[in-house]
Image (cartoon, coloured by chain):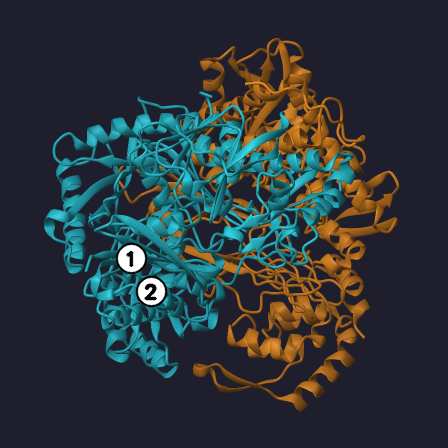
Amino acid sequence: MTQTMPEHHAGGITPGPLDPVTFEVLKNAFVTAVDLMSEQIMRTCYSFVIYARDFSSALCDAEGNTVMQGTGDIAVHVGTLHFQCKAVLEEFGDDINPGDVFAVNDPYRGGTHFNDVSFIRPIFVGPRIIGFAQNKGHWADIGGTVPGSFDVNAKEHFGEGLRITPVRVWHRGRLLHDVAQLLVSNTRSPYSSMGDLNAQAEATAVCEREILRLVERYGTDVVVAAMAGVQDYVERIVRNRLAELPKGEWTAVDYLDADPGQPEGLVPISIKMTIDDEGIHYDLRGSAPAVSTFLNSGYGTTHSALYAGTKTFFPEVALNSGFYRVVQAEIGPEGTVVNAGWPHAVTGFCSGPYEKLMNGIFEIWSKVMPERAMACAFNLEYLLVGGRDARTTDRPYFMWYDWMAGGWGGRATKDGSGATAPVFGVGLAVQPVEGQERLSPVLTSAHRIVTDSGGPGRHRGGCGLEKGGVLTDCENTVMSYCCDRARSITWGIEGGLPSVPHGVWLNKGTDAERFLGVTFSGVPIKPGDSFTRPSAGGGGLGDPLTRDPAAVVEDVVDGYVSVERAAKDYGVVITVIDPELDRYEIDEPATESLRASIAAERSDWLQEDPQDVARRYRAGELDMLDLVRRYGVIVDWGTGELHERTTEQYRELMQRRSAAYWA
Amino acid sequence: MSKQRVAVDVGGTFTDVCIFDETTRQVRVTKVPSTPSDPMRAVLDGVTRADVDLAAVSLFSHGTTVATNALITRNFRPAALVTTTGFRDVIEIRDGTKDDLWDAYHDVAPPYIRRRDRFEVSERIDYSGQVVTPLDEQEARRIAALLRKREVQTVAVCFVNSYVNPAHEIRMREILEEELPDATISTSAEILPEIFEHDRFTTTVANAVLAPLVSGYVSRLAEQLGAGGYAGDLLLLHSGGGSMTPRMVERYPVRLAASGIAAGAIAARHVAAQCGYANAIGLDMGGTSTDISLVHGGELRVTKEWSVEYGYPIIFPSIEVLTIGAGGGSIAYIDEAGSLRNGPQSAGADPGPACYAGGGTEPTNSDANLVLNRLGTSLAGGAKVLRPELAEKAILDGVARPLGLDVEQAASAILKVANANMADAVRLISIRRGYDPRDFALVAFGGAGALHGAEVARELGIPTVIVPANPGVTSALGCLLVDIRHDLSAMFGALAHEADEEEFENAFAGLEAEASARLRHEGVAPEDAVLQRLVSMRYLGQWRSLNVRCGSGRGALAEAVQLFHEQHEREYAFRRDDTPVEIYQLGLTAVGTTPKPAFTPHDASRKPAPAPLKTRKVYFDGNGWLDTPVHDRDALPAGSELTGPAVIDQLDSTTVVPPGTRAEVDEWLNIRIHLTEA
């Protein structure tokens, strides 16, 4: 089935032998080819993390540039797939054959973290490679010192998991069993890893088949020209859009909580963005040296954060290397938290620099495109409880591996989105409790929205959640956690306030209560222990004293905001008439006077002696929300010990993002 | 007086009444405008206008959008959710994902029951069905009293792990019934006894919020029809492609969500089967969108992954229909980077395509068809006159000038993009599942399906296109053809090679007993009841499962496992015979067959087509302008043969037979276009 070459060349719009119709048809067909690959992996995968949509798919051209990425792909893989494809090309050069499939997960070659294993299949027409099909998925385990391969305390990659530099797994259509066996034998779940290895490789064959169908229909040259044309097309859209935007320079700084190898103090990630006639430029120089945990980012994931953060403001633009051409980055020398380099541990980048870069970019673009402004979102978090399941006599290994949705920041026209997947990947689904309870000896105590968790603002942040459980029949069980923002708290903008600190509590509300913080690993726990943690809400946008009191009452009716915090955070005094019938009234005179007094005093609150504030927290006179929203004081939430340097930095931030906008 | 069957299909714009006369064996159709504020008015109005004597109706079936619309508008009576302490927000948290991954200003719709109307009660059952915390009856009574005070009319009771042990839900229901005797109570283990709290809760909540409205609508309609003399059961179309009586609608109103969408797919299957095709793809192209469905081996594809709105799954089997924004009114435009796009924006009914002279200035597919003379200037037998000069101007300004093309090249380009988009959608629903479109026939219907069908088929390598006799009202015909049908399920976790065959058999027997009871309750005679077992399986370690048919008795399970390997290979291109297969769930389809209309075939001995009405120049891609005969469909008897190019006009549609194809009118008055044997 062939078609004669179309005779019309649209004036300079599409290159070479392409007419506009063929171009549009192929552009859409590439989307279909990549999405078919995603669809297949969803249905055949073995890793529950892949099943929860932590995967991506791409069609790359013969040079490894991304032509089309899956429409449902997780944000964090954006802008890394071409690096991995190029790594295979560099490694194997002309020793790439029809029927070969390569694997790679190397974060030092543009990968994300070790769990994310890519399978890459060349697409041949005769002797010629015209492109590559790639599927990248998060294996539930890739070895290393802890189950799930998230070792917070790792300082170098050797303890984190298996590093897979580009390696051939199929040769001319034949599975290299020895190689595959070596890979999966270095994981805690060789059976499921082998299942994923097969499923991912099969998925790339789906894309290959679709591309070859297009070649048969339109000819090699047309398809190859369209692969280039699609990248040019995206570049053109973004450049057109840029032409309408102001030129200039913007900066933002966001922070990791701490570097345990250093004295207490927030760890800066500095972003400068310039828009000029050439495009969008990011400059991350000035960011802190690599930290002594695994919350570092390699160059691949740093680029991903920049692309994904920017893309949030160009939601309808397709993702490919044409986009990457317009977005340039200077990420500075190796050895920093945003360009860690070998052999720094980087697996926790997702909770660390990644989210800080994304949110910092949100802050910058909120100024460039005020109509799409958005305050900070909650931080990605992973809780792992692993050990032996004593409910059955064979005591199998179990892994309760959990991540939460949370709140996103307030927006220019409305409140933030509550209970939403992280910015790291909006398609990342949280797991059903009933499934988890079958697989693990953990009884979930709650999975609910937390009252007052949204950062107050004219448009408040979306609400965060709480999820925790009680251990039932287990042995040799440990808990690990990968998160951040117990101190660098999810912030508001334009006068809005922060939400709530992240962090895990053990046996909360009992004598044995302990605050374990946001990064720890291998904490032993036993049957009967309970644990819980919140996910933060989003930061608020705009001065909360300007929020419509009627909206505050609606929030009280739904329990998103308490009567007490309605007064403290919004200055809205509410009289409870009959809560059983949702009857609440605004006390208007009291509201007016409370708002006036808060407005008069709040700048002083941010100056109060931090030691004294910390003392009052320990004495139970003030609570956590008072400290983070009113006084700008950061303590160890368990012991109440003041973090002096952190508080200083945190107050500076509140000045800049919140107080500076208060009338 | 001869007996009649009546089917009423309510659409967004029109309510179609389809009448099959059992004596003449002819179908006639009446269209009346829909009345969204009270849909029943259009139904009764249509019945009156079609001059139906209700006393002479043997079967009345009905596809309704009442449930779907209520879910979208959230226009409910006071409803509440009672759930396990700690889990009040399951239906708001959902799985946390959004459908639009990148637009931070595009939110998921709010849940069907607001947080203020969700209440927690102390109780807890674990994964194995053991009671961890007994139901606190005092608290339960307090909540029941509170709901009475709040004048709640319908309650969803959704407890964690109730799918293993429903005792607490049942007790809660009893307490609620005592305190709220007039309210409807939906318990999650009864509505959907399946694992995964969000899926089960949301389905139950949808059932609860729909209960007062839908039951009310259905019983009022049944009453009206009864008063008019109809003595039979009113059959309501549900999403699974079957129907149910008002007695079952009362318990499972949520099954009426997406009631209407299945009708077109059922009609496509029927038309394909008439022509001897067990494999067919339905292409139902209307003014704003196209619905694509797939029949394989005589059965429609069914999915349990669907929702009326993103984030709120309704886990009942539903006919799989892929809807894309491509219709006659879809707008073609040049995007900001210079590419020619088509849809999903539509000119709709107002202003409509440019050629409708309703003020539309953007070029649409209808404008392109008109400019190329594929579409005549008069629609609906002259009721609507189209203005080619307006279409030309819209195409010239919107597409031709920016791309440097002449008007006909531009119009042709618009249609090519539209056809390619539809072909891509067909690929998604076919190739994705391992079906090769070349093994299928394309049934093209809806107002615009027959204009595009042959070119879409050519794009996909589909050899045959079937255009039913009345393409514009084919969906209503689907309504006439449904059986009573229920879909039941039960969890069954075991490895297939270890499963106890007796336990397996007993589990099915339990479902069958329940299914038979339901059918009996609906007045289905035992000899009309057909039960089909299904088992849902996966390779040990996988997360998704596949549904395969299962027989009964010894060896049935082993056969099902073989079928699973085969189906897995077809859908995903690989099988692993050495890997253990896990049983996940059992399913049962219970069908109460209703007598189907028996259509009379026409004499289809071959005869040359009568002389065309006229000849006009029609533009075909690759051929340019060709002299093309234009036929009146009503004048083409069964057995007529035509060679493309030809255009066939009828009241509700236009069929294009491109050059290089051959068309015939078959004994059922379908037009069959053969693409490979010109």
Q: Which mark is residue B6?
A: 1
Decide which of B334, B603 is in the foreground and name it: B603
Residue matched to label 2: B47
Q: Residue at x 30, y 36 (%)?
A: B274
The percent position of residue A640, horizontal first and vertical second, equals 62, 64
The answer to whether residue A217 shows anywhere in this view is: yes
Amino acid type of the residue that numbered disc 2 sits on in the rendered structure: Val
Give the SS element for disc 2.
Answer: helix
Give the SS element for disc 1.
Answer: strand
Q: Residues within 10 Å of mark 1 (few under 14, many from 20)?
A: many
Chain A: colour as depicted: orange
Q: Is residue A240 left or right of residue B591?
A: right
Q: Is residue A239 left or right of residue B575?
A: right
The percent position of residue B73, horizontal first and vertical second, equals 49, 66
Q: Residue at x 58, y 21 (%)?
A: A217
The number of callouts visible is 2
Amino acid type of the residue that numbered disc 1 sits on in the rendered structure: Val
Q: Residue at x 61, y 79 (%)?
A: A550
The percent position of residue B85, horizontal first and vertical second, equals 38, 66
Q: Residue at x 80, y 69 (%)?
A: A661
Q: Which chain is cyan?
A: B
- Contact check, label 1 and label 2, Cβ < 8 Å: yes
Decide which of B124, B621 is in the foreground and name it: B621
The percent position of residue A30, horizontal first and vertical second, equals 60, 30
Q: Is residue B327 left or right of residue B2?
A: right
Looking at the rendering, which quadrant does residue A321 occupy? top right
Residue B155's place in the image compared with B4, above or below, is below
Looking at the rendering, which quadrant does residue A299 occupy? top right
Q: Residues within 10 Å of mark 2 (few under 14, many from 20)?
A: many
Label 2: chain letter: B
Mark found first going from the N terminus, 1 or 2: 1
